[in-house]
DNA sequence: CTGTGTTGTGCAACTAGTTGCATAAAGGGG
DNA sequence: CCCCTTTATGCAACTAGTTGCACAACACAG
C-alpha cells in the first residue's frame, strides 16, 4: 500500500493538481514508484474522502477544472507512521531472469535482441540519473534533506549500473554460446 | 503474466505435484519469481484446463491425493513463444526508497532500524547465493544450460551485493545525520 | 461559430497477487 | 480407537495495479 504514501510525499514537497502530480510521477517520484494518472486521481479521491488531504480550489469542482491539493495534519501523521513502520523486504520478482531460466529449457531464440533493448534502456536511465546528480547534487549540497535525497538517487544509479554491467556480461555469454538455440528440444 | 510461465518452466525441468512445486518456488525458482501455494494450485488448474499441462495420476483425483503434472506440447510451445517475445522493462518500484524520500519530509525516526533489518536479510541472501554458486557451479561446469543458469544466479548475487553495499552506505550516512529526526516539522 | 486538438479529470472493468480459511487423507501417540 | 499433527489440495474474498474509455473545458484554425 505505497501509492497513497507516495502521493502524500509528493504533495508535502509541493501542493499540486492531479495532472501536476502525474507529471512528477513521470520524473522524480516515478523513478522508484510509478503510477498512472488514473491511479493518482482515484487515490486523490480516497485521500480527500478520509481527510488526509484537502482541495484548495474554493469553487465546486467542475470537471475539467484544475484542483490543487494540500496535505492535512492527519495525512502527514499517517505518512510519518508508515515511514517509521517496519516492512519486510519483498522477494525479487523479475520476468527477465525468469525468461532466461525458461530459455535454458526451451531455447534462447529471440531473447538476445531483448537483452540488448534492456541494456539500452538501462544505459539511458543511468545517463539520466547521472545528469541529475551532476545538476542537483553539487559537492557542497549536503543538508540532511539533500543527503537523503542523494542517497535515493545513488540507489538508482547503482542499480542501473548493476543492470548495465550484468546485461553486458550476459550478452558476452550469449556470444560464446553454440549458434542455435533450441538447446532443449 | 509470468506465473504460468514460471510453472511451465519448473514442470519442464521436472514434473511435480503442487506441493513439490511450492517447495521449489521457496528455493530456486522463487529467487526471481515467488508464489504461494494457493497461486500455484489455482494456476495449475487453469493450465490443465487449457491443455498446457496434464496430470499424470490416473485415478480420479481425490482431495488429499498427490497429483503430478507434466507439460504438454502446447505448454512448451507457449513457453517458447513467451520467452522469445519482447517485453518492456518494468519501471522500478521500491517501497524502501520511497520511504527514504518520505523521511526527507516527515523525519527519519524509525527507519534506521528497518534499514538494518534489510541489510541483514540481504546479507543472508547473498551468503546463500554464494553457497549455491560454490556448490552447483564449479569451474568446469559450463555447458550452455549451466551457463544460462549461472548467469541468472550471478544476477542474484550482484543484486544482493548492490543492496548490502548501498544499505551499508545509507546507514553510514545516517550516522552523520543530526541526532533527531523530525527534520521537517 | 464550428470542428479539431490539447489539457485536465475521472469512472469501470479487468488482471494479478495476497490472505484467510476449508477439506481430506495419513500417520502416530495416548 | 480417537485425537492431533503433518501433508496435500483447494476455494473465496480481498487488495493493488492496469487498461480502456469518456467527458468537460478551452484554444485556435478555418
Image (tube, coloured by chain):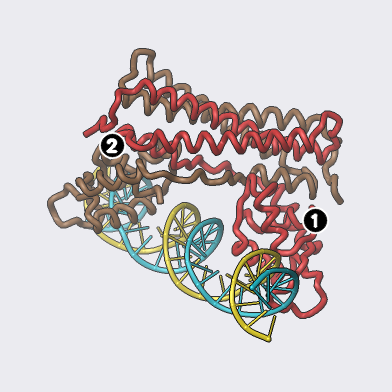
Chain colours: A brown, B red, C cyan, D yellow
Rendering quarter of residue B103:
top left
Question: Is residue B33 shown above or below B164?
Answer: below
Q: Residue at x 35, y 41 (%)?
A: A84
- Mark 1: give few (<14), some (14-19) or many (20+) Cα within 10 Å: some
Q: Residue at x 44, y 42 (%)?
A: B95
Rendering quarter of residue B23:
bottom right
- Mark 2: give few (<14), some (14-19) or many (20+) Cα within 10 Å: many
Tags 2 and 1 touching, CB below 8 Å: no
Q: Residue at x 71, y 43 (%)?
A: A100
Query: Rounded to the nearest whole Å, what is the CA distance between mark 2 and mark 1?
Result: 50 Å
Q: Position of residue A55 (x, y in %)?
A: 20, 50
- Quarter placement of the C terminus of chain B: top left
Q: C17 and B175: which one is in front?
A: B175
Residue annotated with mark 2: B106
Q: Position of residue A81 (x, y in %)?
A: 31, 45
Q: D12 and B47: which one is in front?
A: D12
Numbered mark located on residue B14 in the image: 1
Q: Position of residue A142 (x, y in %)?
A: 34, 18
Q: D3 and B6: which one is in front?
A: D3
Question: Is residue A94 shown above or below D1?
Answer: above
Q: Is residue B172 left or right of residue A69?
A: right
Q: Residue at x 43, y 30 (%)?
A: A152
Looking at marks 2 and 1 on the same chain, the residue that comes earlier in the sequence is marked by: 1
The residue sitting at the top extreme is: A140
Q: Position of residue D15 (x, y in %)?
A: 42, 59
The residue sitting at the left extreme is: A58
- At numbered mark 2, what does the secondary structure look like: helix, strand or loop? helix
Q: Is residue A21 left or right of residue A62?
A: right
Same chain under badges 2 and 1? The reply is yes
- At numbered mark 1, what does the secondary structure look like: helix, strand or loop? loop
Amino acid at each position: 500500500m505505497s501509492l497513497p504514501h507516495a502521493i502524500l510525499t509528493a504533495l508535502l514537497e509541493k501542493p499540486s493538481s492531479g495532472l501536476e502530480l502525474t507529471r512528477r510521477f513521470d520524473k522524480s517520484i516515478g523513478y522508484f514508484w510509478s503510477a498512472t494518472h488514473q491511479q493518482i486521481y482515484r487515490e486523490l479521491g480516497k485521500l480527500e474522502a478520509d481527510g488526509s488531504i484537502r482541495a484548495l480550489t474554493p469553487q465546486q469542482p467542475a470537471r475539467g477544472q484544475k484542483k490543487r491539493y494540500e496535505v492535512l495534519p492527519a495525512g502527514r501523521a499517517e505518512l510519518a507512521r508508515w515511514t517509521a513502520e517496519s516492512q519486510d523486504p519483498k522477494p525479487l520478482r523479475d520476468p527477465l531472469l525468469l525468461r532466461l531460466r525458461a530459455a535454458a529449457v526451451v531455447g534462447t531464440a529471440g531473447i538476445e535482441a531483448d537483452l540488448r533493448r534492456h541494456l539500452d534502456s538501462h544505459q539511458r536511465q543511468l545517463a539520466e540519473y547521472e545528469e541529475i546528480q551532476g545538476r542537483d547534487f553539487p559537492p557542497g549540497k549536503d543538508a540532511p534533506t539533500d543527503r537523503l535525497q542523494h542517497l535515493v538517487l545513488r540507489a538508482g544509479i547503482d542499480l542501473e549500473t548493476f543492470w548495465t554491467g550484468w546485461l553486458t556480461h550476459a550478452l558476452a555469454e550469449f556470444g560464446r554460446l553454440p549458434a542455435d538455440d533450441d538447446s532443449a528440444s
